[in-house]
Amino acid sequence: MPVKSVTVRVPAKVNLQLSVGPKEADGYHNLVSVFQAISIFDDVTIKLSEPGAGLTIAVTGEQTHGVPADAKNLAAKAVALISKEYDLTVDAHIEIKKSIPVAGGMAGGSADAAAAIVGIDYLYSLGMSREEMVEIATQLGSDVPFMLSGGTAIGTGRGDQLTAALSRGTYHWVLALSTHGLSTPAVYAECDRLRAELEIIEPQTHEGLMQALLAADAPAVGKSLVNDLQAAACSLRPALRLVLDVGQEYGALGAIVSGSGPTVAFLVADVDAGLDLTVALTASGVVGSVVRAFGPVTGAKVIS
């Protein structure tokens, strides 16, 4: 009996490193990014519709503000690309149940695109290889290929050329979420403005971070967290500096604005330390909401 519905679960990501090279002639930047997939998930369900119904989208869950429920959604763009590539007519309804923060620097839109690639491949029995999925993903955005694989990985180029990072252990995170997102292009533009008088070199992988991940040394990982966009995010949203300070004051091993922000990720020693920091951040009144997560976890996968 043909499959008529599939649900794909896909994680959020945090950046342990985001190093940004000089602005290129095409307006983009070369990046070195160390990603870790963490245990905050969107569930993307795709159900076949009547022939001729086309593609419809609904967005539900905790994090829906500002997420398009039309062709502008990255999941819909993923389906459109696959349809073109495989000469496929897709009549389906996509329901995206969101827990990943929107415009939070945690790749929520990219995650949904990765889930759509996996889901359409499964639903239509396309038999896509991992390489073929990555080829589609790369056209959608620099974070999308990583959301297919998950784990811990190093992204170079635009951030989309991935190699697995040699990493051991489980890492515990406390995430301070903001009620309002930050625009990624605006953060990059501010980064360029702040660095206009500086000579910017091509980014390199942080060796200290790589050694710490291999040794499962969480305190050393915490000391090695780096994000070249952090100053720009804090410039556009000065309250983030206070959030970073409060978290470190209350015992975080390290703190970083994730991606282009405004989510702030705090690395903690263990589950108990995470609970303590969650309570302290909540009581401080400087954050919108606080969630706990662990990583690394696997990327987009079919769960039903």
Image: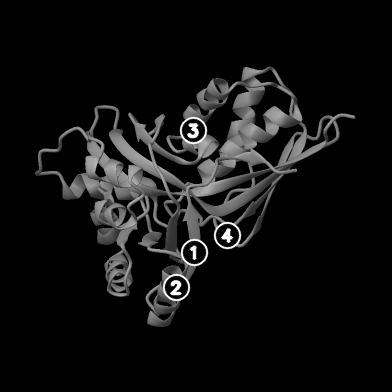
The answer to whether residue 225 is left or right of residue 95 is left
User: x, y (%) of residue 210?
Assistant: 29, 41
User: x, y (%) of residue 280?
Assistant: 40, 78
| Residue 47 visible in the shown view | no
Question: What mark, if any, has residue 278 been given in the picture?
Answer: 2
Name the residue rendered at 55%, 42% in the picture.
298
Q: Badge 3: how crowded within 10 Å, few (<14), some, or many (20+)?
A: many
Assign a secondary structure to mark 3: helix
Name the residue rendered at 46%, 53% in the picture.
103
Task: Residue 77: name its quadrant.
Answer: top right
Mark 3 or mark 4: which comes first in sequence?
A: 4
Question: Is label 2 or label 3 in front?
Answer: 2
- Amino acid type, callout 4: Gln
Q: Badge 1: how crowded within 10 Å, few (<14), some, or many (20+)?
A: some
Mark 2 or mark 4: which comes first in sequence?
A: 4
Distance from the alpha carbon under mark 2 to that under mark 4: 20 Å
- Amino acid type, callout 3: Pro
| Residue 290 visible in the shown view | yes
Question: Is label 2 or label 4 in front?
Answer: 2
Question: Is label 3 or label 4 in front?
Answer: 3
Distance from the alpha carbon under mark 1 to that under mark 4: 16 Å
Q: Which residue is mark 4?
A: 63
Q: Which residue is mark 1?
A: 292
Q: Which residue is mark 3?
A: 145
Distance from the alpha carbon under mark 3 to that under mark 4: 22 Å
Mark 1 or mark 4: which comes first in sequence?
A: 4
Name the residue rendered at 52%, 46% in the picture.
297
**Where is 84 relative to 23, above or below?**
above
Name the residue rendered at 64%, 33% in the picture.
118
Question: What mark, if any, has residue 149 been given in the picture?
Answer: none
Of the pair 261 and 9, the residue shown nearer to us:
9
